[in-house]
């Protein structure tokens, strides 16, 4: 997770540099997003060989948001955003599942803004997400030794700047699950069983959010 530490450091540096800009579209922002993760994932277990049909699960998503926007002109800003999922993720087996940390570049377009006052914007995001096991519940399966932990992630949506500091948004997000390899540890009785597994599919999210820009 050293990459995440470096990203937080980068955003902190950008927050200091943003003081020099007068535009409400430039600066560091923090916030929270919430909604639903809809996982549509097929899993193949190698020992014994077993392939599941696409398994659709819907779980709650709660994520803090940290990002930076840089104004390009009155209608466009570019930035970077990180939003680790604290609750939610993609449940793939029993009570054990996966969670993720999206790291995305952002582009925001303000088609109705003819002045320096922020209002309606449309945005797109793209980047990578770090996949990790979210742990296990007692006597449940757990996921360990994950390979291919970096997966593609994309998002689009609409936002509205209530003021130069506060914004709200509605977002659709698509996380790719491609050849995600891991071990399933089944804490059964009287013995523990370990199985090799591969998952493919997607996690689609509908999220609402609110952020505050410094």
Image (tube, grey):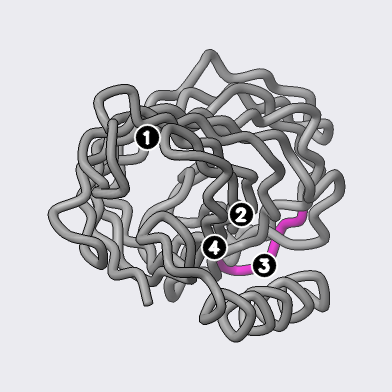
Q: Which residue is mark 2?
A: 80
Task: Find disc 1 in the rendering and name its residue.
Answer: 205
Instruction: Give the number of the disc on residue 191.
Output: 3
Q: Is 198 covered by the magenta stretch?
A: no
Q: Residue 155's spot in the image, x, y percent?
A: 48, 31
1 vs 3, front mark: 1
**Mark 2 vs 1, N-terminal side:** 2
Disc 1 or 3, which lies upstream in sequence?
3
Q: Is 150 positioned to the left or the right of 59 in the image?
A: right
Q: Quadrant of residue 122?
A: top left
Q: Is residue 145 above or below residue 178?
A: below
| One can see residue 93 in this view | yes
Which comes sooner in the sequence, label 4 or label 2?
4
Q: Nearer the viewer, mark 2 or mark 1?
A: 2
Q: Between tags 1 and 4, which lies in front?
A: 4
Secondary structure state at the residue bearing disc 2:
strand
Check disc 3: other Cα within 10 Å, few if <14, some if 14-19, many if 20+.
Answer: few
Q: Which mark is residue 68?
A: 4
Mark 2–mark 1 distance (CA, rounded to whole Å): 19 Å
Q: Callout 1 environment at 10 Å: few (<14), some (14 to 19), or many (20+)? A: many
Q: Nearer the viewer, residue 86 or 22?
A: 22
Disc 3 versus disc 2: nearer the observer: 2
| Residue 104 horizontal side relative to residue 19, left or right | right
**x and y, in percent, of residue 100 in the image:** 58, 55
Q: Please report whichever mark, 4 or 3, sits nearer to the chain's N-terminal start.
A: 4
Distance in Å between CA atoms under marks 1 and 4: 22 Å
Res. 160 image quadrant: top left
- Work out how far the residue at label 4 is from the one at label 3, CA to CA, in angstroms: 50 Å
Find out whether the residues at labels 4 and 2 contact each other: C-beta distance under 8 Å: yes
Q: Residue 157: horizontal and vertical position, in percent?
A: 34, 29
Callout 4: SS: strand
């Amino acid at each position: 997770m050293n990459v995440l530490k470096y990203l937080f450091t980068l955003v902190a540096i950008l927050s200091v540099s943003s003081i020099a800009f007068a535009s409400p579209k430039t600066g560091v922002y923090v916030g929270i997003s919430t909604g639903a993760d809809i996982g549509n994932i097929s899993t193949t277990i190698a020992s014994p060989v077993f392939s599941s049909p696409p398994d659709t699960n819907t779980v709650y998503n709660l994520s803090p948001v940290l990002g930076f926007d840089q104004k390009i002109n009155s209608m466009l800003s570019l930035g970077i955003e990180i939003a680790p999922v604290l609750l939610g993720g993609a449940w793939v087996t029993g009570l054990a599942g996966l969670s993720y940390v999206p790291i995305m570049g952002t582009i925001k377009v303000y088609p109705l803004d003819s002045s320096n006052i922020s209002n309606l914007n449309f945005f797109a995001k793209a980047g990578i997400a770090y996949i990790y096991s979210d742990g296990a519940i007692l006597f449940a399966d757990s996921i360990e030794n994950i390979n291919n932990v970096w997966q593609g992630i994309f998002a689009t949506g609409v936002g509205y700047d209530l003021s130069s500091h506060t914004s709200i948004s509605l977002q659709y997000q698509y996380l790719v699950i491609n050849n995600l390899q891991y071990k399933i540890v089944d804490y059964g009785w009287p013995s523990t069983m370990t199985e090799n597994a591969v998952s493919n599919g997607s996690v689609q999210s509908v999220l609402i959010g609110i952020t505050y820009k410094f």
